[in-house]
Amino acid sequence: MITQEELATTKISMRYDLSPIRNIIGDLSGLLGNFSDELIGAFYPKTVSKKANIVITELVNNAVVNSPEGDGKITLEIMINKDLLKISVTNEAKRSQYRKVKDHIEMINSAGDLRKLLADTIRERRKDRLRGGLGLIRLAAENKFTLAARYRAPYLIVDSQIGLGGLS
Ligand SMILES: Nc1ncnc2c1ncn2[C@@H]1O[C@H](COP(=O)(O)OP(=O)(O)O)[C@@H](O)[C@H]1O
Ligand SMILES: [Mg+2]
């Protein structure tokens, strides 16, 4: 009999390329999140697959809503092994968009207290009646993911990862 512990050492990697972006009309981020959740959940505990779902849904949604309409593509890459869950999402973006995301992620990574950053951001945005701007902070604050952004013109790549040492 194979044990749960052994199952949770399975190496899995997945990659999805979707184009053209103008054909993406359904809930692609939810679909990819749920699908990956099921596959990862067949080997790893629900606590792990649920986290993958949340991050995939958020990052793919960011890629879809911030991509220029047209022929461009979106790429989702997922890798999991006993030590690490890694999720990367690539979309077309202007250099100025990359800078915005990079600055935002740097701000998150340099925050000493992520829960306070989340609470302060919610308060500030409510005051100014602003929407959004919480997704990436949430991934770091509530789901303990490390974030990074890279630019390979014309593509922005957002990388996120979490160690599974204490999780599974
Ligand atoms: N994949 C991406 N491509 C281009 N811009 C992005 C991407 N992801 C995030 N951004 C920019 O960074 C901002 C912050 O993202 P996020 O924390 O997810 O907040 P929200 O999506 O709720 O606005 C977004 O409003 C958007 O301007
Ligand atoms: Mg978002």
Image (cartoon, grey):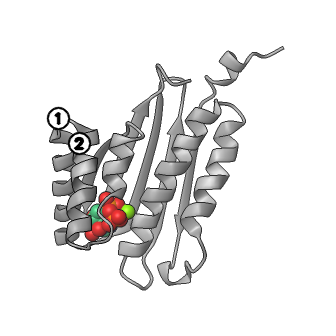
| 43 vs 151: above or below | above
Is the C-beta separation of discs 2 and 1 under 8 Å? yes
The percent position of residue 119, horizontal first and vertical second, equals 27, 49
Give residue 123's position: percent from left, percent from top.
Answer: 24, 58
Using residue 79 as the reference point, say whether residue 136 is left or right of it: left
In percent of width and height, residue 143 lies at 42, 40
**Neighbours of disc 1 within 10 Å: few (<14), some (14-19), many (20+):** few
How far across and how far down the image is residue 53, in percent? 56, 49
* The image quadrant in which ligand 2 is located: bottom left
> Which image quadrant is residue 45 in?
top right
Q: Nearer the viewer, mark 2 or mark 1?
A: 2
Quarter of the N terminus within the rendering: top right
Residue at image mark 1:
112
Identify the residue at image location x=60%, y=39%: 49
In the rendered image, the vertical position of residue 118 relative to residue 111, given as above or below: below
Q: Which residue is mark 2?
A: 116
Residue 154 visible in the current orientation: no
| Amino acid marked by disc 1 | Gly
Residue 71 vertical position relative to residue 92 in the rendered view, above or below? below
Residue at figure coordinates x 64%, y 30% from the top left: 44
In the rendered image, which quarter is residue 59 located in?
Answer: bottom left
Q: With 51 as the anchor, is 93 left or right in this view?
A: left
* Position above or below: 40 against 5: below
Quadrant of the image containing the C terminus: top right
* Residue 153 location, quadrant: bottom left
Amino acid on which disc 2 is placed? Lys
Secondary structure found at label 1: loop
Q: Secondary structure at mark 2?
A: helix
Q: Residue at x 41, y 34 (%)?
A: 162
Q: Is residue 108 left or right of residue 69?
A: left
Dot 2 alpha-carbon crowd within 10 angstroms: few under 14, some 14 to 19, many 20 or more: few
